Image (cartoon, rainbow, N blue to C red):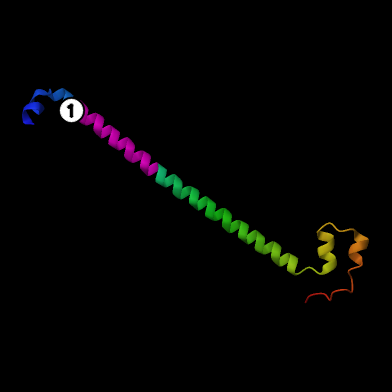
Amino acid sequence: MNAIWALIPNWLKITAAAVLAAFLCLAAGYVAGTIKERQRSALVAAEATAKAIQKRADIDEEVINMDAVALCKQLGGVHEQCDQLRGLEPDKP
């Protein structure tokens, strides 16, 4: 093996080592960037999920606190038809 290695000129060995080192640096940078982007994407998705859950909780609380007439009107019911609901269900505290 040393005989074959001795036949290769030093300039070619140094060039090959530099190309290999550059390739390894680029590959490491690519992997690090990919990992960082995945973490950022996961964080954005988690924040969006948390906001959606909070918004849903706010809407649920608002709907729970409505009486039947207000809920009918909020859902687009006709004013006269919604007024017929008065007295059918006691208002929630």
Which residue is depicted at the point 6% across and 27% down? 3
Is 55 situated left or right of 7 in this image? right
Is residue 48 positioned above or below 71 on the image?
A: above
**Magenta span has 43?**
no
Q: Main secondary structure of the magenta part?
A: helix
Residue beneath label 1, please? Answer: 14
Looking at the rendered image, the quarter that the N terminus falls into is top left
Callout 1 crowding tier (Cα within 10 Å): few <14, some 14–19, many ≥20: few
> Given the image, on which type of amino acid does mark 1 rest?
Ile
Give the residues in magenta. Answer: 14-33
Which residue is depicted at the point 55% across and 55% down? 47
**Magenta span has 19?**
yes
Element under disc 1: helix
Is residue 20 positioned above or below 31 on the image?
A: above
Looking at the rendered image, the quarter that the C terminus falls into is bottom right
Residue 71 figure quarter: bottom right
Is 7 situated left or right of 26 in this image? left
